Amino acid sequence: MRFMMMTTASSDDDFGQSEELQAEMGAFIAEMSRSGVLLATGGLDPNATRISSSGGKVTVTDGPFAEAKEAVVGFALIEVRSREEAIELSKRFWGIVGDGEGVIQQVFGPEDLPPAE
């Protein structure tokens, strides 16, 4: 099972990281990579580009978006045996970084579709 773990932040969050936090997070990422659990990770620019489609017309709007209360600013794509395992890894992550919020969502791909007849 694959899960996307996303970190959200509001516009007034401070992203300062101590050397100790960076070392602890580096060790956690290395452990997950060695075990094969971590498929991808990265930070995201909160100044996104919004794409919307309505009535056949596609609109592109550049951020930042003043009306947005929070943005996804980081992610980790993991492969684990269960939702509970994903939650435990997320708890370990938040134990390292401290206060904050995030979202865990299961990821489905072509291999999750029923076979074609």
Image: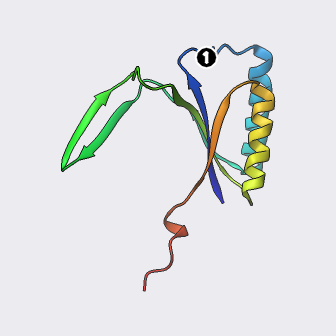
Q: Quadrant of the N terminus?
A: bottom right
Q: Quadrant of residue 24?
A: top right
Which quadrant would residue 90 be assigned to in this image?
top right
Considering depth in this image, is 85 or 43 the residue closer to the camera?
85
Circle 1 — which element? loop
Residue 18 image offset from top left, x and y in percent: 75, 13
Which residue is found at the position 49% from the left and 80% from the top? 115
58 above or below 46? below
Relative placement, left or right, of 40 versus 27 is: left
What residue lies at 18% left-to-right and 50% top-to-bottom?
56
Number of numbered markers: 1
Q: Position of residue 102 (x, y in %)?
A: 64, 36
Residue under label 1: 13
Q: Quadrant of the C terminus?
A: bottom left
Q: Residue at x 78, y 39 (%)?
A: 91
Q: Residue at x 54, y 60 (%)?
A: 108
- Image quadrant where residue 6 sits: top right
Label 1 crowd bin: few (<14), some (14–19), many (20+), radius 10 Å:
few
- Please give left or right for residue 38 compared with residue 92 in the image: left
- Specify the amino acid type for callout 1: Asp
Location of residue 58 with respect to 8 vertically, above or below: below
Can you give x and y, in whole percent of width and height, for residue 88 in the image? 79, 46
